[in-house]
Image: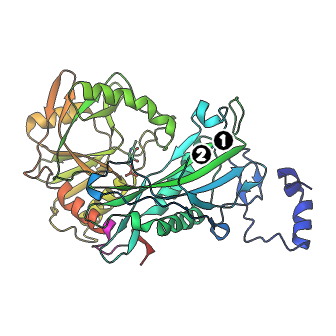
Amino acid sequence: MPLTLKSLRTGALRQRLTTAGRYDKSTWVRFVSAATGESSSLPDIQASRLQLSPTGSPKSLPQASGLVFGHTFTDHMLTIPWSAASGWGAPEIGPYGHLTIAPSATVLHYAQTVFEGMKAYRDERGKVTLFRPDMNMKRMNNSARRVALPGFDGDQLLECIKELIRVDKHWIPSQPGYSLYVRPTLIGTEAAIGIHPPQDALLFVICSPVGPYYPRGFKPVGLFGTTEYIRAAPGGTGAFKLGANYAPGVVAQKDAAHLGYEQNLWLHGPDHHLTEVGTMNLFVVFKRDNGALELVTPPLDGMILPGVTRDSVLELAKGHASKKYEVPGLTDSLVVSERPVTMKEIKDASEAGTLVEFFGTGTAAVISPVDRIGYMGSDVHIPTGPDGMGPVSKPIWKELVGRQTGTIPSDWSVVVCE
Ligand SMILES: Cc1ncc(COP(=O)(O)O)c(C=O)c1O
């Protein structure tokens, strides 16, 4: 009898498998199929089923100093197939290589794809850690559901990813600032033209050794305030990490570059509310009348990607402001706000001398200082400190990088191998 949603739901097959000793509640977990919206009992991702097929021809390791972000990949990749009929298949770590999918695969036509970005760090003693990977697993599940791709057990996927990193850990440069960028991706692979929840999908994870974003010290960037296009809208998909969100942003980025700016600033609505910087979350620091510094980031209103770095910056700043712990070097007169900010507020503050700093946050760059915003024909100038960073971002960056790399002990750092 074939394994089908119907047969599992009626319990007939479950009964037969139980009698045969092949049905075990702990491994056949219950989940809600994102494809059908129906409750079913098909296998979820199970790290215990992971198979390893090592490459027969390992590549030679690249020179760390020559790495270009996202251009070099390790020897292995993780793949986990899914189908609506049989759930998640056995995870496999095999040689990094091309995928075979049909030209009719839904991902190629309807952008049925979601992805994540996280980093693994290796210290000089060889200990490898990930930074808050549970947040990436949660966000990937949320993104998958938004485009009717299947959900999965994030803890089990994380165990498989840790194994992939262990297999390729010698690819992580141990020099300060270097890391392994880990890119989990989920695509709809059903070979059928037609817009519906894909009946087949593939989750894969690839890894890329990367160097520091600013190898020669912080270099503040200029932003171009985009008023021609928007990145997201209420009820849209801006809060999810979908492939479909990124292709339309390339034109805005190209336009910004053409005008001499490094990145574009996404604005929204008639009041030009600030939302994100290119592919980063944004923070602004204002000086208030009483001399206190206010660290502001726009709220998670459905248009903003809930960044792991954003959350970490907020948590550190709020913890410091409430005296729960101390971020060395950060002012005690700090107020932390998640509230809307408009370009008018930024312009007015720049003119009044109360704009203290502006920066983007994201896994790739961690913190990226900004020194000007091209807006409606002129530049809004933003102060930067002598080394490119401001009085709030600098101490937070130090604390964050310390926690990411393990030099500052923290629950956020998850051990992959000692
Ligand atoms: C649109 C967008 N916003 C913000 C971020 C920052 O998120 P995180 O800090 O999790 O890297 C990213 C990067 O993934 C992004 O693509």
Disc 2 marks which residue? 99
Q: Residue at x 39, y 55 (%)?
A: 308
Kindly identify which numbered label has been placed on residue 133.
Answer: none
Which residue in the rendered view is the most extreme toward the front?
57
Q: Is residue 62 left or right of residue 18?
A: left
Marks 2 and 1 sit apart, C-alpha to C-alpha, by: 11 Å
Rendered-image quadrant of the C terminus: bottom left
Q: Is residue 374 left or right of residue 74?
A: left
Q: Which residues are magenta?
A: 404-410
Q: Quadrant of residue 298?
A: top left
Disc 1 marks which residue? 189
Circle nearer the N terminus (2, 1) = 2
Q: Residue at x 77, y 54 (%)?
A: 86
Q: Is residue 174 magenta?
A: no
Residue 355, position as x, y percentages in the image = 14, 42
**Secondary structure beneath disc 2?**
loop
Residue 210, position as x, y percentages in the image = 34, 55
In front: mark 2 or mark 1? 2
**Secondary structure beneath disc 1?**
loop
